[in-house]
Image: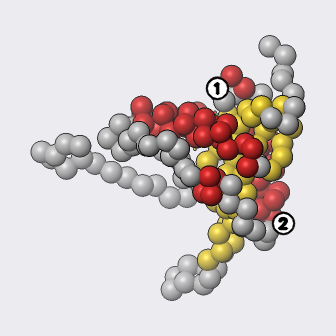
Amino acid sequence: MKKPSFAIRRATDADFPQLCELFAEVDAFHRNSRPDLFRKARRPARPQPYMLIEGPDTAIFVAHRGGRHLAGFILAEVQRAPDGMVHKRATIASIDTISVRSAYRRFGLGQRLLSRACRWARKRGATKVALGVYEFNRIAIDFYEAMGFRTIVRTMEQRLPGTSG
Ligand SMILES: CC(C)(COP(=O)(O)OP(=O)(O)OC[C@H]1O[C@@H](n2cnc3c(N)ncnc32)[C@H](O)[C@@H]1OP(=O)(O)O)[C@@H](O)C(=O)NCCC(=O)NCCS
């Protein structure tokens, strides 16, 4: 299949309906994978101000064709933590969500979105990029590892005997 041609830019208000669709795809995947953790949200799951926050330390980048049709997006935030009791101060780019429509996966768009967000975060003073990913999301883990990420912390769980839900 011929590689489709997409460009990357900052999101605008006009992208809101398509960003809702893209978020809905990620949300459905998480809900289907772990119905004990995730529930179907009332639409839109994220109100417009949440998505298009144009604060200096938050950004959404989109992969688009012809300005309008979106193939994917990344939502990133630069987080600044001062010295703590035991933790050193840090300025870290946190990836909240990245998603590429199924039809456009494995064309390098995830890599381009991530690298654009990292470039932006670096200009904002970030020295590391971090994210959380569910263990069931093997594809995302493979993607992140291919991008050079390594696991530094694990969240573990087990069901308590005699409970459900
Ligand atoms: C994770 C995701 C964003 C990757 O986007 P993508 O555009 O397909 O990724 P790329 O084409 O840039 O892939 C870059 C590299 O990552 C690795 N990779 C990506 N998808 C992979 C897969 N399905 N299996 C194994 N490795 C994979 C490969 O090394 C790939 O390079 P290659 O194609 O030359 O082998 C996409 O699969 C997605 O949207 N998943 C659903 C949403 C999601 O789970 N988001 C993360 C949690 S919020």
The residue at label 1 has a CB less than 8 Å from ligand 1: yes
Residue bearing mark 1: 102
Above or below for 150 versus 5: below
Give the side of residue 8 with respect to residue 110, left or right: right
- Please give the name of the residue rendered at 62% of the width and 52% of the height, measured from the top-left corner: 48
Q: Position of residue 125 (x, y in %)?
A: 78, 71
- Please give the name of the residue rendered at 41% of the width and 39% of the height, measured from the top-left corner: 40
Look at the numbered disc 1 and give the secondary structure of its residue.
helix
Q: Nearer the viewer, residue 9 or 122?
A: 9
Residue type highlighted by circle 2:
Lys
Q: Position of residue 45 (x, y in %)?
A: 50, 46
Give the side of residue 110 with respect to residue 21, left or right: right
Residue type highlighted by circle 1:
Ser
Residue bearing mark 2: 123
Above or below for 128 versus 15: below
Sequence order check: which comes first, mark 1 or mark 2? 1
Q: Position of residue 99 (x, y in %)?
A: 65, 39
Q: Confirm whether residue 91 shows in the render.
A: yes
Q: CA distance from mark 1 to mark 2?
A: 31 Å
Q: How is the image coloured?
A: secondary structure
Q: Quadrant of residue 50?
A: bottom right
Q: Residue furthest top?
A: 1
- The answer to the question of whether label 1 and label 2 lie on touching residues, with beta carbons closer than 8 A, is no
Q: Quadrant of the N terminus?
A: top right
